């Protein structure tokens, strides 16, 4: 049996239904947050398109901020599927070891995904469809009203 690893999800994968579409079935989940990071939409959706304006979710270090999400317990096989979904082979995102915290103050060492600096840019906006996926996931998982309001009022592009 393979060892399990915690995965900190902060975008559309906060809804386990999106993981199930990838044939990933977590054995455990709990709401958590990533301290001293903020949520940004600064990963180029299509880095080959020279004038790209659409951005995907990313975590950016920022003292005093938190990124809300969900911790899932997964297998290494599950991470291989997530790697493909995040574009790891294409060098869009990479796995990053972080320390997440649950509402009781318990700390968890977890893997998450962060955008490579050379595929990030300032001034990007998420597409309306992409943001809807994240909003739907946040509603379905019962994330905080603060997160939902941030997502619902965040500007988008086509």
Image: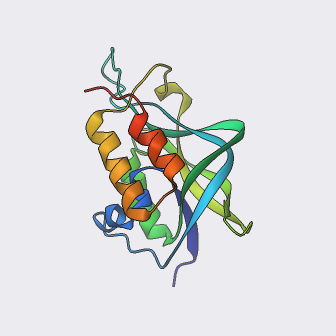
For the point 50% across and 52% down, which residue is it?
145
Q: How is the image coloured?
A: rainbow
For the point 52% across and 45% down, which residue is it?
94
Q: Left or right of 49: which side holds 28?
A: right
Coordinates of residue 122 in the picture (x, y in percent) = 50, 20
Where, by quadrant of the figure, is residue 20 drawn?
bottom left
For the point 71% across and 70% down, which residue is it?
104
Where, by quadrant of the figure, is residue 141 drawn?
bottom left
The outermost residue toward the top is 51
The outermost residue toward the bottom is 1
Coordinates of residue 92 in the picture (x, y in percent) = 44, 37
Q: Left or right of 48: which side holds 76?
A: right
What is the quadrant of the C terminus in the image?
A: top left
Coordinates of residue 111 in the picture (x, y in percent) = 58, 57
Coordinates of residue 78 in the picture (x, y in percent) = 43, 67
Q: Left or right of 50: which side holds 71?
A: right
For the point 51% across and 85% down, which residue is it?
1
- Depth order, front residue of 65/3: 65
Q: How many discs mark residues in the rendered view?
A: 0
């Amino acid at each position: 049996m393979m060892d399990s690893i915690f995965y900190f999800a902060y975008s559309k994968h906060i809804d386990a239904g999106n993981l199930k579409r990838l044939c990933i079935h977590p054995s455990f989940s709990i709401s958590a947050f990533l301290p001293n990071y903020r949520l940004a939409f600064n990963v180029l959706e299509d880095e080959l398109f020279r004038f790209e304006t659409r951005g995907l979710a990313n975590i950016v270090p920022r003292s005093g901020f938190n990124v809300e999400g969900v911790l899932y317990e997964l297998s290494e096989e599950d991470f291989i599927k997530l790697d493909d979904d995040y574009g790891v082979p294409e060098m869009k995102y990479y796995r990053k070891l972080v320390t997440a915290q649950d509402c009781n103050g318990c700390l968890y060492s977890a893997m998450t995904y962060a955008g490579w600096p050379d595929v990030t840019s300032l001034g990007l906006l998420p597409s309306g469809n992409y943001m809807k996926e994240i909003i739907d996931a946040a509603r379905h998982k019962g994330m905080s009203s603060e997160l939902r309001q941030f997502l619902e009022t965040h500007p988008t592009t086509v």
